[in-house]
Amino acid sequence: MKSIGTIIVSLMVASAAQAGMYITEYAYAATAGEYVEFTNLSGAPIDMTGWSYDDDNRRPGQFDLSAFGIVQPGESVIITEGTASGFRQQWNLNDSVKVLGDYTNNLGRNDEINLFDSYGNLVDRLTYGDQNFPGTFRTQNTSANPLYPTALGINDIYQWVASSVDDEFGSYSSVSGNVGNPGFYVPEPTTLFLLLSSGLLIMRRR
């Protein structure tokens, strides 16, 4: 039988891991396929069995993310409205990048991205829209990336920027000419190291 101390430590580890899964890129109007990228920025693997995604309806369980399974630290995973194979071909991604295709609760011009854990708890949310938030951009054939690691998890679209070829995120053109960097998240290294080593990134999510 597990001791109370062991149970508490296990819960703390699970909570820290959960807090480390973030929305790190999205594109809602793209000829190469609309997509959302999630990245594990914690120091521990995260089991996404039972996790789900939804748009501004905010309903857990709408699009099942269980097929991602165990997501390793630093690993990015992708959902797309197209097929997984077609998306990989568009972006020249190999099979090691986990892609789930054919989701039907598609994103709109002014919408939300909601990530839920296996208990239906909200893990991360990003509300966007160039019409609802004047001065922000429209991700039409160009993805959006967080300007700084501190932009993650705080739901402030004004801290996101449009990707461009050869930018600091490693963005490039897809076969059909879309611009993005799906499958990997490359923040500014020094800032990310300081956040992770101090625990500030996890604290901001809580």
Image (spheres, rainbow, N blue to C red):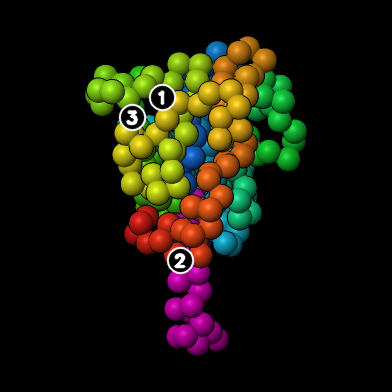
First in sequence: mark 1 vs mark 3? 1
Mark 1 in CB contact with mark 3 (< 8 angstroms) = no
At 71% across and 22% down in the image, what residue appears? 89
Relative image position of residue 3 (x, y in whole percent): 50, 87
Q: Is residue 92 left or right of residue 187?
A: right
| Residue that badge 2 annotates | 198
**For numbered disc 1, what is the local secondary structure?**
loop
Q: Is residue 16 above or below residue 163?
A: below
Say whether residue 162 is magenta: no
Q: Which residue is mark 1?
A: 107
Q: Nearer the viewer, mark 2 or mark 1?
A: 2
Q: Point out the tag, 3 or 2, that comes first from the N-terminus.
A: 3
Q: Quadrant of residue 60?
A: top left
Q: Amino acid at mark 1?
A: Leu
Q: What's drawn in magenta, residue-wise? A: 1-21
In the displayed structure, 125 sits above or below 74; it is above
